[in-house]
Amino acid sequence: MQLSRLSYFADFFLCPMFAVALAVVGLFGRDPASLGEWLVAAIVGLIAWTLAEYVIHRSVYHRVQPFQGYHDAHHEDPKALIGAPSVIGIVLIFAIVFAPLLPLGLVTACGVTSGFILGYFAYMMIHHASHHWNARPGTYLYHLRLHHARHHYAHELGNFGVSTAVWDHVFGTALEAQRRTANR
Ligand SMILES: [Zn+2]
Ligand SMILES: [Zn+2]
């Protein structure tokens, strides 16, 4: 969906704020052991985000209307400020991740949600950088930029991961891997 500059960049600021707020809410006044529990939960949330990002891009943005239509607009004009309306992503994360995890305890729910939101933030930053910034060859961003460029410009569909290429390799949608297989 085409967004105003304010709406496009709002989540870039809101996500880190929510991640910090969840750390404060989850850890305030608790014993030091809770920090370990929170960190493990945050790492789980971060990894869960990368899988969610892959599944959403592959199975929703490229298959389910009206999201496919919004995403097609991004493929047609990759530099346009197109994305999910601000705050909606964060509200959905609270509804789908935070609320169901609350029965496991506030520390775990806050930790996983914080990691998930940080993953969402990393995805938005990397995706924006992939289309708007130059990356130095050899850096991780350069590798991801190339990975996403193949998603946009290759003839076959693949490379759905944006913040990591791992899930494309796990699920066999990495375009480089397919090409190597095809050449064999
Ligand atoms: Zn796409
Ligand atoms: Zn893109």
Image (cartoon, rainbow, N blue to C red):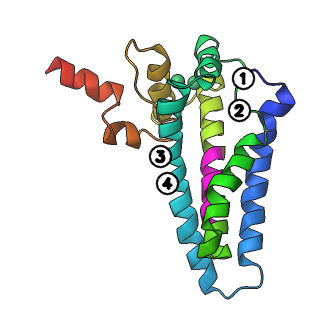
Q: Is the Cβ of the residue at disc 3 closer than 8 Å to that at disc 1?
A: no
> Of marks 3 and 2, which one's residue comes earlier in the chain?
3
Hey, what amino acid is under mark 3? Answer: Leu
Q: Are marks 4 and 1 in contact (CB under 8 Å)?
A: no
When the figure is inspected, residue 72 is found, relative to residue 50, above or below; the finding is above
What is the number of callouts on the image? 4
Task: Where is residue 163? Give x, y as percent.
Answer: 52, 40
Q: Of callouts 4 and 1, which one flags the residue occurring earlier in the amino acid sequence?
A: 1
Q: Sequence order check: which comes first, mark 3 or mark 1?
A: 1
- Residues tagged 3 and 4 counted as in contact (Cβ below 8 A): yes
Disc 3 is placed on an element classified as helix
Q: Is residue 177 left or right of residue 24?
A: left
**Distance from Cα at disc 3 to Cα at disc 2:** 18 Å
| Image location of residue 20, percent across then percent down | 75, 62
Q: Which residue is at a point 50% across and 18% down the rendered structure image?
A: 152
Cα separation between marks 4 and 2: 21 Å
Q: Main secondary structure of the magenta part?
A: helix
Point out the stretch of residues depicted in magenta.
111-120
Residue named by callout 3: 51
| Residue with the mark numbered 1 | 1
Q: Residues within 10 Å of mark 2 (few under 14, many from 20)?
A: some
Report the Cα–Cα distance between label 4 and label 1: 26 Å
Calculate the distance from the C-alpha at mark 3 to the C-alpha at mark 4: 7 Å
Mark 3 → mark 1, Cα distance in angstroms? 23 Å
Of the 4 image quadrants, the one containing the N terminus is top right
Q: Which residue is mark 2?
A: 84
Q: Earlier in the sequence, mark 4 or mark 2?
A: 4
Q: Is 91 placed left or right of 122 in the picture?
A: right
In the image, is 132 to the left or to the right of 29?
left
Q: Is residue 29 visible to us here?
A: yes
